[in-house]
Image (cartoon, rainbow, N blue to C red):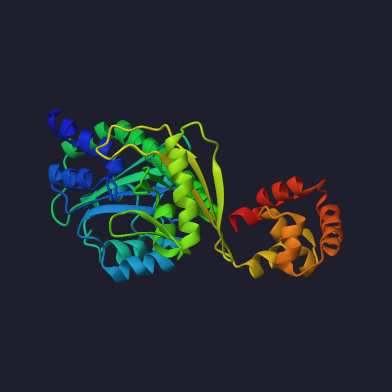
Amino acid sequence: MRTTRPILDLLPLLLDGVFEDPPWGGFLDRLRQETQADYAAMTFRPPGKPLNQVAHLYSGAASPPLVSQLYHEHLYATDPLPYYNLAEGRAYALHELLRAGEPGHDSYYRDILVPSGMKVMRMMRMMRVMEPSGVNGWLNITRRTGDFTPDDDALLHAIAPYLRSALRNFVALEHERFNAAMANDAISRLAFGWFTLDANLHVLDCDHQGENLLAHSGILGRNANGRLTARPRLLEQEITTTIRALAADARSRPRAIILNRAPWLDMLLLPTHKRSISAKPDPEVIAYVHGDNWSSADRCEQLAELFLLLPSEARLALALSRGMTITEAAADLGLTVETARNYSKKIYSKLGARGQSDLVRFVMRSVLAIA
């Protein structure tokens, strides 16, 4: 029988394969080498999914493109192989899975397997494993000439428990990746970014959204020396004065600055005590920047739809939700203060808000925050 050496060589590749892109390429290459197979594949299918909705990874010469296309489009529906009835951890030869003389089995053999190079029934091995959440995995090896040996079957059987563990880790990792992608998408929709600065306004570090705002906002930017810039000049002076004051006194309260109103862009500046062991200088100030991807007109329309406001009420609600006072909002919208007060009462009534603080909270906690 085969020694333990091949399995010891394969295990690190199997366990580390979850971090490859695509996964398990090294493992499948080595398995194909150890079994002298022309083709090795791992196929994963969540429970309840159609046979053509699979994750398929392989090493070697794949089926002809036309054969694969025909299978994924319609032949999968008549696939006679009993995938889910295979005993876990056992390597099956093809002749144990297909019954010669039955029309469906014969057509599958003729239309799928023969064009893919499997003309002899004993030239394929298939093994199933299933991880705890119900995701099934099948490991296949095939040859165009010659049969697999009992040693090859023994190697697949020895791999089975480790393959099950690797599949479990892969499913858990994919679940976390999916959750992280959803969370990152929500965060990106909030349009928040950050960057850190020293006392001389040099940008030291930033996240993707912060980088995007510095590059494309048209309000904030960096000069050739990496120093933060802002337009107009008076805004840059205000930011410069604020950052230097925060850097000089680590106990200073955070400062908020409205950078632009249409489209909306604001920034929160605060001293930071965070230190790192990197080669970069330690930051003195961190800037949290928030931009709105929608125009004010779009936001007013969304507010009107969500809270059943009239257009005039929606415009005032948007202004108040962005921190303007009644007087400021009235002047900005061309209303008298009295008219703005009357509108605000109707807005609060429709939202069930007791005042402006409630209005801000309702708007910021609504789905509009991630629209």
Residue 114 left/right relative to 5? right
- Whether residue 47 is visible to the viewer of this picture, yes or no, is no
Residue 267 left/right relative to 337? left
Tell me the residue at 33%/65% (across/down).
68
261 is higher (above) or lower (below) than 242 = below
Q: Position of residue 210 (x, y in %)?
A: 43, 53
Q: Position of residue 149 (x, y in %)?
A: 16, 41
Tell me the residue at 29%/47% (across/down).
23
227 is higher (above) or lower (below) than 24 = below
Q: Residue furthest top?
A: 4
Give the tally of numbered discs: 0
User: From the image, which quarter does the C terminus lie in?
Assistant: bottom right
Q: Position of residue 307 (x, y in %)?
A: 77, 59
Query: Residue 351 versus residue 44: which sits nearer the camera?
Result: 351
Query: Residue 22 versus residue 119: which sits nearer the camera?
Result: 22
Residue 42 left/right relative to 54? left
Q: Position of residue 369 (x, y in %)?
A: 62, 53
Q: Quadrant of residue 159?
A: top left
Query: Residue 201 versus residue 106: which sits nearer the camera?
Result: 201
- Whether residue 164 is visible to the viewer of this picture, yes or no, is yes
User: From the image, which quarter does the N terminus lie in?
Assistant: top left
Q: Quadrant of residue 322?
A: bottom right
